[in-house]
Image: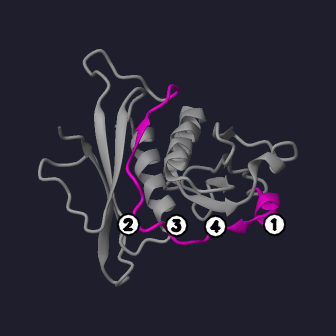
Amino acid sequence: MCAAGSGGGVAAIAVLHEVVPEEFASSVLEFTAALSEEERRCWLGEHTRTRYLVGNPANLAGRLPPTTAHRDGRVAWYREDPRTGHRELRLLLRALRGELPADPPPYVLHVPRGLPEPDRARSPRSWRITVDVRDLTLPGYLVHLGHTLSEPAITGVLRAGDRIAVHHTRRLTPPAGGHAYLRVHRDTDDPRRLRAYTVLADERP
């Protein structure tokens, strides 16, 4: 994988045959759990940078075995090859493009084994991720959601066994009670301004 702090490299590649938001989100957690602690730190040092490509993982597995493949067969993840940056994948496949469905349904995720377990003083927690989908493209959705899942998983905010309810809105307001992670990036309407795209917080009853 990348050398921490090297900058400019693609630290991971996701190959998607079809985008189903719930399955994509599960695949992010599975990939993060499959990495060693050193690889996780390295990926975090590269701001969990990921390239999203369109392809059929089943057609690639024999020639280019992935680091992880989601159980549905529609998503495969690759650690960066520091020697080639997976040049062969990038030559074979095209970058993901497309529009996000108008009203993505909510879904529930569970943080898999392989990530740190809760300590004795902390039982599994219930979280809520809210994604502002206003004017988001499909790649934009994957980018913002991918950061919101991988970075808290790497830093230990999310623990194995935690439950995450993912919801969508068209005007994000961070919860009054605070949050564990807030994804802020350039506004799609005005790149001179910043906008909150996702928030991770305790799920309220």
* Side of 19 where 74 appears, left or right: right
Q: Secondary structure at mark 1?
A: helix
Task: Return the x and y of residue 104 as percentages of the image width and height.
Answer: 42, 59
Task: Return the x and y of residue 196 as percentages of the image width and height.
Answer: 30, 65
* Disc 4 packing (10 Å; few <14; some 14–19; many ≥20): some
Badge nearest the viewer, 2 or 1: 2
Q: Which residue is label 2 attached to?
A: 133
* Side of 123 where 102 appears, left or right: right
Q: Secondary structure at mark 2?
A: loop
Q: Secondary structure at mark 3?
A: helix
* Label located before the other in sequence (2 or 1): 1
* Residue type marked 4: Leu
Q: Which residue is label 4 attached to?
A: 96
Q: Which residue is label 3 attached to?
A: 138
Per the model, the C-alpha gap separating discs 2 and 1 is: 30 Å
* Label located before the other in sequence (4 or 2): 4
Q: Is residue 182 visible?
A: no
Segment colored magenta: 86-114
Residue in the picture at 25% in, 18% down:
121
Q: Which residue is label 1 attached to?
A: 91
Per the model, the C-alpha gap separating discs 4 and 3 is: 8 Å
* Disc 1 packing (10 Å; few <14; some 14–19; many ≥20): few
Q: Secondary structure at mark 4?
A: loop
Residue placed farthest to the right in the image? 63
Per the model, the C-alpha gap separating discs 4 and 1 is: 13 Å
* Label located before the other in sequence (1 or 3): 1
Say whether residue 108 is magenta.
yes
